[in-house]
Image (cartoon, rainbow, N blue to C red):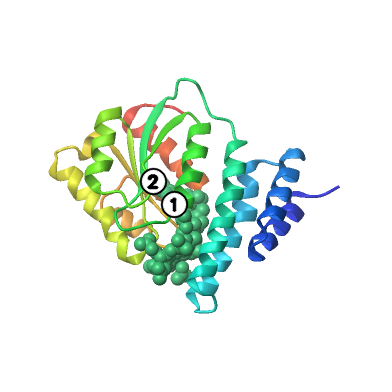
Amino acid sequence: MVTKEEICNEMKEAILAYDKAKCIELAKQGIAEKFKAIDLINDGLTPAIQALGEKFGRGELALPYLMVGAETMQEVLNYLLETMPKGEYKPKAKMVLGSVKGDIHDLGISIVEAVFQANGIHVFNLGKDVPKEKFLAKAEEEGADIIGCSALLTGTLFEQKVMANFLKKQGLREKYIYLIGGGACPSAQWCEQIEADGWATDVLDALSVAKKVLAEKKGIEI
Ligand code: B12
């Protein structure tokens, strides 16, 4: 019998070898074995793309290879996200989510979208490179409870602060729960500094934070 660890390790190896077909086959096997899609993502796909990112950061991998790795991950991710439950028919809260202006990393937000949706938080995923005005306009239009901004680059991290200040300037900061995330950058200190309501660099932490703040600030129990 194959274990979850074995499947995850083989998925990671397949991504590192840019072998999409093999990785999808393994993902299907994992689902057939009744392993959770989120575990296959967190323990198989995410460490693989992080390993490629580290190589890229050390100058051992050229950008086109990182792009191929990301595309490989994206397809397997799409398959796994499709297998996840879609959540309650009537969600208990709404969230507008996106990557900040200038940032084109969007693998992480699609995971946040799927996991939040499966847990009763309806997500409007605005995608990548989203200006502050668009976040707010969508939140106002949909009556969102949460605005979530992702940033992965040191150079785009500042946009999370720009969003917080924009909300304040519009007199709408207290209306929304403001969460920040994205692998490379956020920290508790940054969260405090820009007066966000919570931060996370992992989807399950993000869900716990969202649940906690929804209960505290809006009286919504998820
Ligand atoms: C894949 C990748 C790419 C892909 C992106 C493909 C895509 N569709 O997303 C491509 C190849 C296109 C790319 C491009 C670039 N990249 Co890049 N990339 C990465 C890499 C390897 C992985 C990112 C990722 O997807 N991680 C996996 C996901 C699942 O994790 P995540 O995004 O963090 O999301 C999780 C949590 O953070 C959280 N979360 C996410 N969003 C939110 C939001 C909220 C509200 C909450 C609460 C939680 C939350 O939940 C998610 C699921 O667990 C990282 C390395 C790394 N360690 O992060 C570099 C990295 C981020 N990139 C880097 C760079 C430099 C670039 C480029 C500038 C390269 C270039 N010279 O052009 C460009 C950026 C262009 C731009 N304007 O954005 C650097 C950034 C360095 C820095 N500190 O600024 C990194 C760190 C690599 C490195 N070590 O040098 N990249």
Q: Quadrant of residue 51?
A: bottom right
Give the secondary structure at mark 2. loop
Q: Amino acid at mark 2?
A: Gly
Q: On screen, 174 above or below 196?
A: above
Q: Is residue 139 left or right of residue 85?
A: left
Residues packed near mark 1 inside 10 Å, few (<14), some (14 to 19) or many (20 plus): many
Residue at (37, 30) in percent of width and height: 94
Among the two numbered marks 2 and 1 on one chain, the one whose residue lies closer to the N terminus? 1
Residue 63 rendering spot, x and y as whole percentages? 48, 70
Can you tell me which quadrant of the image ligand 1 is in? Answer: bottom left
Residue that label 1 marks: 106
- Kindly indicate the quadrant of the structure image that contains residue 186: bottom left
Q: Mark 1 belongs to which amino acid?
A: Asp
Mark number for residue 127? Answer: 2
Compare residues 83 and 213 and report the one nearer the observer: 83
Does residue 29 appear in the picture of this structure? yes
Name the side, left or right, on which 60 lies relative to 100: right
Residue 201 visible in the snapshot: no
